Amino acid sequence: MPNVGGMSENTPFDGRRWHDMGGQPAGPVTPEEHDFALWEKRVDALQVLMSGKGHFTVDGLRRALEDMGEDAYEKYSYYERWIAAVNQNLIEAGLYTLEELGAKMDEVRKRGDTYGEAAGG
Amino acid sequence: MPHDHHDHDHFHHEGMSPSGHPYRADNDEPLSYWQTMEIAVRELLIEKGHTTPAEIAAQIEAMDARSPANGAAVVARAWVDPAFKQRLLEDASAASREMGFDIGALHLIAVENSDDVHNVIVCTLCSCYPRNLLGLPPDWYKTRAYRSRTVKEPRKVLEEFGVSLPDSTQIRVHDSTADMRYIVLPARPEGTDGMSEQELAQLVTRDSMIGTGLPRTP
């Protein structure tokens, strides 16, 4: 059986994927929260604007997030996963290519070591 | 995948922001892989004419303007205006639009607390939240613990938020979807008879509209 949605190969399939968390055992709720950073707000804005213009749907965003698997959910922050999902949907929609993204990311990295320097403010 | 800050220490611990939350690592932190991707995606979209810096800035401004104060205004109106409350319970999207709030395409449902019933909202599958009325969801709303346990042991989860309800109170948990979002209409606190709509709105906390809290009392 293929490894579905990040599920361990030794886990018997019970009809739910990793993101279907309702009713599963988990630890206490700790009421953490933070003020969103500029880059996180930008990711949110890109999601709203690009889905609003019809380049992808909320379902497309969710499909990409769910296909990243449980490991990504545990390792990366919310907007880290969101930019990955937005990016995947935009590439699928043909707005730019993987090669263009790679070249642009290289260019961005060369501008500086902090977000402020690399983003130009 | 290249990514070099696996520790979860995203926070500055030195101080709190004016809203009482920790500052998030921002512009002066080492550039991360995902931040690099955000900059690159944004610039590609601008270069190719799919958006503009002004459009992105306007969208951020619109989102920043959405705060629990919007939801609180709707709740306070429902507390003072029975006809509005009726419309809110029938169609929360339409009633909120009536007050000038942009609800988008969302189907919004208001669920009313009473002496016997307490409502809580959750999104077990992801992070769906009435963001058009309350702003962006708090981190805990998106955690495994809240998503997993709220539908199974809500009473215990509420206790972790400091909300203890009598056993006689029925707890109803509403699981949101991308297209259908809930907002709790908390019960109007006692001793508020002479208060104005604006004063009442001050009593309505974000968590009281999620169901993990109760309104303030005067």
Image (cartoon, grey):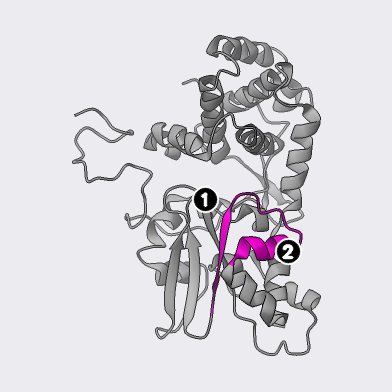
Q: Is the residue A106 above or below the residue A23 in the image?
A: above
Residue A1 as seen in the image, left or right of residue B81: left
In the rendered image, the quadrant that contains the C terminus of chain B is bottom right
Q: Position of residue B159 (x, y in %)?
A: 46, 71
Please give the chain letter of the residue carrying mark 2.
B
Front-lying residue, A40 or B44: B44
Front-lying residue, B197 or B31: B197
Front-lying residue, A19 or B50: B50
The amino acid type found where label 2 is placed reads Glu
CB under 8 Å between discs 2 and 1: no
Q: Is the residue B145 above or below the residue A42 in the image?
A: below
Q: Position of residue A52 (x, y in %)?
A: 64, 37
Visible in this render: residue A111? yes
Picture residue at 22% right of the left edge, 46% below the top: A14
Q: Secondary structure at mark 2?
A: helix
Whether labels 2 and 1 belong to a single chain: the reply is yes
- Specify the segment rendered in magenta: B91-113
Which quadrant of the structure image shows residue B56? top right
Residue B140 as seen in the image, left or right of residue B56: left
Q: Position of residue A117 (x, y in %)?
A: 75, 22
Q: Circle 1 sits on which residue? A: B179
For the residue carrying disc 1, how many other residues have a C-alpha within 10 Å: few (<14), some (14-19), or many (20+)?
A: few
Picture residue at 46% right of the left edge, 21% below the top: B1
Earlier-in-chain disc, 2 versus 1 = 2
Q: Position of residue B201 (x, y in %)?
A: 74, 73
Visible in this render: residue B215? no
**Any magenta on residue B71?**
no
Q: Secondary structure at mark 1?
A: loop
Specify the label residue B190 is tagged with: none
Q: Circle 2 sits on which residue? A: B98
Picture residue at 78% right of the left edge, 43% below the top: B61
Picture residue at 59% right of the left edge, 75% below the top: B186
